[in-house]
Every structure is written in structure tokens, then in C-alpha cells.
Amino acid sequence: MRAFIDGFQLIRIESDVYIHDIQLENNEVNWLKNEEFNQFFSTKVPIRLHLDDQIVINHQSYPLEIGIITLTTAFDTMFRYDGPLGCQYEKNKTTFTLFTPVAKDVKVVLDGVEHDMTYEKPVWKTAIQGDHEGKPYHYRVRLVDTYRDVTDPYADASGHDNRTYVIDWNKTFPVTPGPARIKRHVDAVIYEGHVRDLSINLDVPSKGLFEGLVEKSGLLGGSVLSYVKKLGMTHLQLLPVFDFEGVDDHDKTALYNWGYNPSRFFSVEGWYSADPDDPYARINSFKTVINEAHRIGLGINMDVVFNHVYQFRTFPYDHLVPGYFYRHDARHKMTDASFCGNDIETRRYMVRRLIIDNLLHWVHRFQIDGFRFDLMGLMDLETMTMIETRLRDVNPTIMLYGEGWNMQTEVPYRQRSNMANQAQMPGYAFFNDHFRHAIKGELHGPGLGYAMGNRHLSHAAMQSLLGSPNLFTSPGQSINYVECHDNLTFYDKMLLGCGYENPTFKTCQDFANHLIAIAQGIPFYHAGQEVYRSKKGVENSYDSPDAINQIHWKPKDPAVKKLKQLLRIRKAHKVYHQTDYAQKATIERQGDNLCYTLENGREILIHHLKPGQGLERIALDQGRLIFASQKALVEDNVLIVDQPGVYIIQIIKGRK
């Protein structure tokens, strides 16, 4: 027999034994109904959630457990808190505050010593006198009749034995101001990389670590960060750097993971730190990366995961407010739309607050320049709107974007943060899978894309180059890409589609890379994409070894020079940075090719897009060739080309 609190005045008994007597201290309990194996009872007055832990049934005492009350709107409305949470360090005292309105007792264990906490609806608090900097802490929480050691969900410093620590943030490195902020999303060019992947195959001392991004490489002729900046990127998007599971912080080669296994949202991951036992070392290592990036004018965007946690049974929230943190269906069963075993219920007040607090933490403490939201379509619109409002109050030009897939979830269709609802999210950009499909081809199958010569996708490519006006309210909402950390790289996709390696593959990939650069919207490149990165055909390399995920850098490859040249052209010409669809951008078919024209009061840029092999002659019309994807010959005011690619002719208005 088990007893659960399902409402403020509702108790559920799991048993078919006849109940002739039921007692709850300082309350009156009455039979309500029976349903299958459950018997329901109502109480005269509300149950005291932080006190009532036993119920007497047929003269025998049973634990009174937390039931589905935490899933109710009434609970979410009743227990809201806007004060400080976590630990607040001061030289003469440290204050601990924990949200758990259903706990019967909470103690903070500071450096091995227990301290009682006091309930002040809906949180437990205590202030411990003295200087406690550098001491480990956690909580001991009793929900019913058993104490459990629980980590603070707001813990912002992890260290030895994966414990959480009290630290003095004033002793961490200061963060230098961010680079000159972009005025519009369309001015950005994003480069996505995994901290370990970026340096593990380089000649730097700190391979695979934060410091490996700032150390000089002889191969690159500088640091990873300087390479990314010189390539023409404005922002480096890092795969998760918050504290995640699935790796060994000390034996760095034992396990590999992308990091989409959230463990502690506010702490820095130790796998990337040379000294993971020292919480200051973790924080300062990451700050070193940010400082160097900002010094050279490069923004740092963080990949954040608020759709699931790695293990809901070990994540602290369920030991504080059971069920509250996770999404459930109409039958009170946990959902799994993320395919990771759980979904975070972003619509609940204190969950939403944790998400916003976390993002503000990274912005205030680390001067993060933007956020990429993993599986953003599982989050609700109200949360995303509040995120944008709060973050833009701090940084009006912060970049916000994510995966806006329409995934099946308990959130009503019109309240989902997906591409279909993009009109309600004008401040967010979305990974444009239509662009990817048009240029790259089928996601999982062998079907080839426009960049590989599939002229049947010409119309889709035309829409994509214009910024997908069929999908979005403005071009600034379209993140144009053909590969990212997930799914096959472009090069591996060509291998899958053709079944063998072809000498033209590099030409096709150059074409795709260049189409991204000239399209309206936000260009996005996967690290190593510019040098034909391959993962040996592994589509989902989230836990594959370095042999699969490492980048084989080729900084002197002609393809790198070409992409640099084209991104300089993009930066210099405002016609590539259009913020609405009313501006002059047209595209039309010309035989097997496409002609993409951009125009303003000063100039006309005509892009001849050639998807196939074969000799062609293109009239310059008094213009001049300013870019050619592959070798081209200009003779008698005629451009002669025979390779697939982008060929740009500039005409200055008023010049004869």
C-alpha cells in the first residue's frame, strides 16, 4: 500500500484493500472515489506539503509520498519565487537558497559539516557565517522519510570528484569586452566547432583543451581562434561547454562525447580543462578562450540544451520537486519527444526561470555573444519570447537561433518554437533544412543536391538563395548550411550518393560552400568544411573516437583562400545583407544554370551559378569578374568557364 499527494486536498491510495479508517495530522480525510487499483480521498484543509509526511491507514502508518500534485497548474501557480537561488558568497558569510516546497527537511553540507536550513515558502534558506570560499557543498534533502544527497541545480562551480564549490567570482579572470557587435544577424558568419575536435590534431601543447584554441600552431600559423577569424567568420559557435556527462574529466582519451548530456547547466565542463579538480581552473580556462576571441574581434556563441537532461534519475531536480522539471502527457507519463528519455517542461514557472537565469549567468559572467538552442522546437514560444526580452536588455545585438524542427510534443502546435511559428519569433534565426536539402540532397538517402549537379532541385535552390521567402518573414531568420556536427558531412554525403570517390567532389563542395556565402541570410559553416572534412561515413559521431571526429587541417589548401576571398566580398557588399524581401534580389534560370542578381543604388552583382561540367562563354556586359569558384578565363569581354561553381560579375552603375 502506497499513499500519494495528488492535489492540495487530494490523496491517492494505491491499494484495493478496504480502507475503514484514515488519519492525517491536523486534518480530516474523507473517501472520494475508487478507480481501478486506486482509492481517492479528499481533505478538509490543504495538505501541508513541507510538513505532512505520514498518513495512518487502518491504524498503520505509511509514508505520504509526493504524487502528481507537482504536475498541476495550481502547484505551479502557488509556488513561485523570484529571489536569489544557489549560493551567494560574501567574505563574512555564504547564503544558500534552494527551491523545494515539498521537502520536509533540508540541510546544507558545507565542507563535510551539516547545517540546518529554514523553510521560507517556497524555498529553504540559511546563511553560514565566516569565509567559506573554496569549500565543497551539497544538500541533504528529505522529501518523505529518507535523506538523499542532492547537488544544487544552480551550482556554478564544479571541481574535485565532480563536487560543487563555493567560489569568489571576483577572483576569476575578468572578461574583456566583446567585439564590435554586429548590427544585424545577416552581418554574421558562424563557424561551428567542438573544443576537442578543433585542436586534438594540431601541434599545440594543450590538445583537446580550452587552451588549445588560443595556443599558436605552426601548421595554422597562429591559433585556432585566429584561423577562424581570418577565414572570415564573425562568431565561433562551440558545442556544449557546460558540465556534461559521458566523458572522463581526468582520462581524456577514455571516452568522447559532443556534450549534449546536461548535468550542471551553470558549471564549466572539466573534460576541456587541464585541471578539472580546480573549479577556478575550469572557469578561467574558458574565460581565456573568450578573452582571446574578443581581443581579435571574434564572438563566442554557446550551444545550450534545454530540451532534456542526460539522466533524469540523477539530475538533482527530481530529488527536490519530483516530476515538476519534466514534461508529462495527459496520463501523467513522462514524454520523450527528444528521444533522450525525458523532456524538460519549459512552461513551468521555476523551470523557465532556471533557463533564463542560466543564460543570464553565461552572459554576465562570461560575456557570451549568442546562443544556439538545441531542439528548440521542443521549447514553448512564451519561454523563448521571455528569453529574448531578458537577454536583449543586456545585449541588444545578442545572437539567438536554434533547431526549429516541428517535433511531436505535448506543447500545442501554435505554442511551439518551430519554423512553422517563425512569424511569432522574429528575433530568432532557424537552421534552414530546406536550404540543406536543396544544396546537399537527401538527409539520409543517396539523393544528391543542386551543388552536386541535380538540376531538378534548381527551383528549391533559387528559393534558398533568396533567403527562403517561402518559409520566413525576413532573410535574417534563415541560417544557411549544408553540414553541421550532426549527420553526414558534405564530403561523406557525396561518397554515399555516388558510392565511390570522384575527382569532382572537391569542386562540388567548393560550389556548396560558396552558395552559402552568397545566399541571403546567415552563413553557417561546420569546422573543417572548408577543407572537405570527412568523418569516414559516420553519420552520428557523438561518441566516436578522435580518429573519426578530429579535423585534418589544411590551411594552405586553395579552397581556404577562395572561401576567405568570397567572405571578404560578402562583408564588403551590403547587397548580401538584406533584411527584408522587398530589396532587389532576383534569380532566374538560364539554360542549365542560374543567374542570381543583387542590386542597389551603386552596383549590380551578377552571379552565374553553374552546376555542371562543360565549356561556357558568359558575356561580361561591361562588368568585371570579381570572383570565380574555379579557374576562369576572361577574353574579349567574355568569361570562359568549364567547371561548376559561382562566378560573380560586378557592374558599377554610371560607369561606361
Image (cartoon, rainbow, N blue to C red):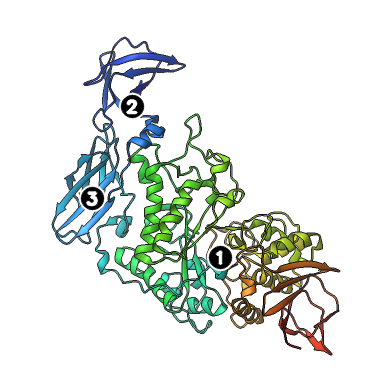
Q: Residues within 10 Å of mark 2 (few under 14, many from 20)?
A: some
Q: Is residue 569 left or right of residue 456?
A: left
Which disc is residue 174 wearing?
A: none
Measure the alpha-carbon separation of dots 3 and 1.
Answer: 41 Å
Which disc is residue 96 wearing?
A: 3
Q: Position of residue 237 (x, y in %)?
A: 50, 66
- Residue identifier under label 2: 8
Q: Residue at x 60, y 51 (%)?
A: 419
Q: Is residue 500 visible?
A: no
Measure the alpha-carbon separation of dots 1 and 2.
Answer: 52 Å
Element assignment for label 1:
helix
Q: Is residue 155 visible?
A: yes
Q: Position of residue 600 (x, y in %)?
A: 67, 75
Q: Residue at x 38, y 34 (%)?
A: 70
Q: Name the residue nearer the viewer: 130 or 393.
A: 393
Element assignment for label 3:
strand
Q: Where, quadrant-wise, is the C terminus in this rendering?
A: bottom right
Dividing the picture into quadrants, the one containing residue 540 is bottom right
- Residue identifier under label 1: 549
Q: Is residue 116 above or below residue 626?
A: above
